[in-house]
Amino acid sequence: MAGENTVRLRPPNNRLNERAVNWWRTQVLLTAAVPALVLAVLGAFIEPARTWLLVPAGVIAVLGLACTAFFPAWWYRVHRWEVTDEAVYVCTGALWQEWRIAPMSRIQTVDTVRGPLEQAFRLATVTVTTASAKGAVRIEGLDHQVAADLAEDLTRITRATPGDAT
């Protein structure tokens, strides 16, 4: 029997900012480009191992480009978030989806982070820390102003929410 304070798992309503797609594309592209470039440069200078270096460089480059074209758009379609007066809801993951709920009464800290790439795309990440062994709930790919407003709202809501006595 569910009590009136039960938080139910349900799909969150909000999408991330559309700029998150290009942010993810840049991350995937850089992740593939660095090893491909290193192998290609080594292959250009080490003649006896040229084939053994250039072939993997090409494979990494092709796979990196395919992943850059496909995955970020898919991630954008499946990532969702929402904040209510009762909880923070986050749904992430492409193949293995993870739905997380952080009840307001369990929230300990709210942080906003903007790495260099996020700053370039005017995005931010909001991290909601609870006492959960699973770790913090992260909402990545938010417009930087939405993230700042969200952190302010969460701080206000959690301050007004009595702690859970359990």
Image (cartoon, rainbow, N blue to C red):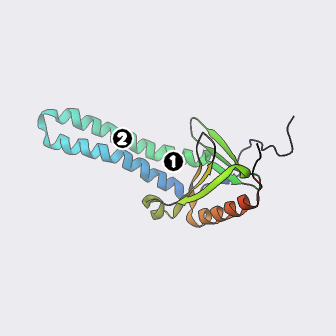
For residue 47, above or below residue 113? above
The answer to whether residue 66 shows anywhere in this view is yes
Using the image as rendered, state which of residue 21 and residue 147 is in the foreground. 147
Compare residues 96 and 105 and report the one nearer the observer: 105
Front disc: 1 or 2: 1
Residue 8 screen position, x and y as percent:
77, 42
User: In front here: 149 or 164?
Assistant: 164
Instruction: Report how far apart the C-alphas of labels 1 and 2 lie in the structure.
Output: 16 Å
Relative to 108, residue 63 above or below: above
**Quadrant in the picture for the N terminus:** top right
104 displayed left or right of 136: right
- Graded by Cα atoms within 10 Å as few (under 14), some (14 to 19) or many (20 or more), the crowding at tag 1 reads many
Q: Considering only order in the chain, which callout, 2 or 1, is on the residue closer to the N terminus?
A: 2
Report the residue at 57% width, 39% height from top.
94
At 12% from the left edge and 33% from the top edge, which residue is drawn?
48
Q: Amino acid at mark 2?
A: Val
- Give the labeled residue for mark 1: 72
